[in-house]
Amino acid sequence: MLTFLPISATFVANNDKETPIPDRTAIVTYKSVPAGELSELGADTRFVYNEGWTETIACALPATQRDHYYRNGLIPFFEHLGPEGWLRGRQARAGGTAVQDDFGLLLNYGADCIGAVGILEPDGSRLIAPAEPNVIEEAAALPGRTLSGVQKKLLAFRGEKGFEPCIRASDPATHIAKFNREDLPTLVQNEDLSLELGREILGDAEITKAKPAVLAGIEGLALLVERFDRVDDEKLRLEDFAQILGKPRGREFDGKYHSSYEEAATVITRFSARARIDLARYFRLVVFNLVLGNADAHLKNFSLLETSEGLRLSPAYDLINTLVYPDYERTAALEIGNAKRAFDTLDRALLEALGAAIGLPAPEIKRSLDTLAKGFSGAKTLEFSARIQPDDFRIAYREIIRGNAGRIFA
Ligand SMILES: Nc1ncnc2c1ncn2[C@@H]1O[C@H](COP(=O)(O)OP(=O)(O)OP(=O)(O)O)[C@@H](O)[C@H]1O
Ligand SMILES: [Mg+2]
């Protein structure tokens, strides 16, 4: 048990004067029922389960320990519920909090997060959304809802007008709409193609359901990703690997890169209800990402999902061939064999060693690599019409995959 420190106030510099911010508290809900209390104690934070509550709400916060104390920051599990890049800027501005203030962001926007855990103001108050100039900003600033991830995204649902962004508290957030970036106009198409390739090679059930569609009132195509952590009105537990490993997000949001594919696999060994099966699924997914050319398969892009048999590796999401974008990282997101590896150095021996290190038997590793090799070489998803333009991004997309597959499966 961690020691309890006295409550103090936090001081921040403000125009050369020191302004005290009173320590804050929040109600933590699990499947919309209050399960505990989160509080700030100076720079530290503490989560305490409510008396009588017995169910564990997160792998990193076992209920056998009633009191979880964390020094110098917000407990990573909660930190990772908050928004990153695009959405963080908007929710910080609309809610009047500092961009780095995770606690404040969660009090305003954390009532309904990804997964089963939510954050509420202890007095039941709710932020009143300021007027916004357009529907995108309005949806981003809707109080009581947030999600992690760097890219431009909104919560959405299928309404009377087709897909619509959630702009009212009563709109069911059944989908995540992901948009192109001005500097990356093929992002939606890339992810759609990569998910389709994943379905063909790994199987339908292994990949999140998603399709490109227009969102009412918003120009251009978005990728509408169906949430698997919502079944009708029920919130299913969904925890990403950064949350489970308790990795602080980092000031630059780089905590999710400070790990290895071997360390990530320990999440499955420790918490999956079917560890042997899920380790093999995880191995195939990691290799798929490496052949795909996804340099962004970091800890938050793997999760455990609540199922009828317990926590299991969730379907794959956020699959993108990032190597088609020349300005992007050329190394894999996580270490393999104690080093960050450039894609052009990945080979079969390294991946066989990875498989062995995470505990897979040699015949299983061989079978997985052979099946993947066959899947990539015969992939119908990579057969494009003869009329495809030479500058179509899919030409480079396929070349990168063929290069990676050639090296990795040789
Ligand atoms: N189908 C899904 N069902 C439930 N939750 C999902 C689903 N897809 C993604 N998520 C959650 O939403 C988060 C953000 O989604 P996603 O990773 O697609 O966004 P991103 O902005 O592209 O991420 P990144 O920061 O890795 O680029 C994920 O980390 C995961 O927690
Ligand atoms: Mg992601």
Image (cartoon, grey):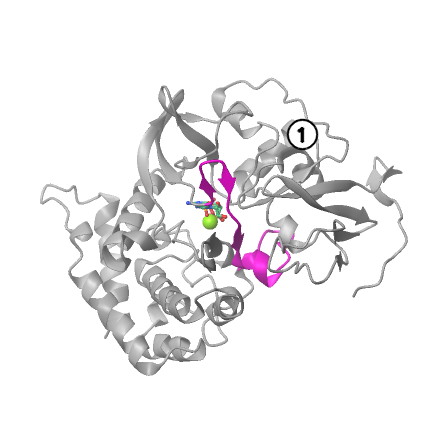
Image coordinates for residue 31, horizontal then vertical, percent:
58, 42
The answer as to whether callout 1 falls within 8 Å of ligand 1 is: no
Residue drawn at 63 percent across, 22 percent down: 129
Image coordinates for residue 339, horizontal then vertical, percent:
48, 73
Image coordinates for residue 142, horizontal then vertical, percent:
57, 27
Neighbourhood count class around disc 1 (C-alpha, 10 Å): few under 14, some 14–19, many 20 upward: many
Q: Residue 341's quadrant in the figure?
A: bottom left
Q: Quarter of the image for the C terminus: give it.
A: bottom left
Q: Residue furthest left?
A: 386
Q: Between 40 and 250, which is closer to the camera in this rendering? A: 40
| Residue annotated with mark 1 | 95
Residue drawn at 79 percent across, 47 percent down: 40
User: Residue 242 vs residue 391: left or right?
Assistant: right
The relative height of residue 408 versus residue 22 in the rendered view (above or below) is below
Q: Which residues are magenta?
A: 229-256
Asked whether 254 falls inside the magenta stretch, the response is: yes
Q: Residue furthest front?
A: 52
Q: Between 160 and 383, which is closer to the camera in this rendering? A: 160
> Which SS class for mark 1?
helix
Q: How many marks?
A: 1
Q: Quarter of the image for the N terminus: give it.
A: bottom right
User: Residue 52 vs residue 345: left or right?
Assistant: right
Q: Residue 332's quadrant in the figure?
A: bottom left
Residue drawn at 76 percent across, 35 percent down: 122
User: Residue 353 vs residue 75: left or right?
Assistant: left
User: Residue 265 vs residue 211: left or right?
Assistant: right
Q: Is residue 394 visible?
A: yes
Q: Amino acid at mark 1?
A: Gly
Image coordinates for residue 270, horizontal then vertical, percent:
53, 69
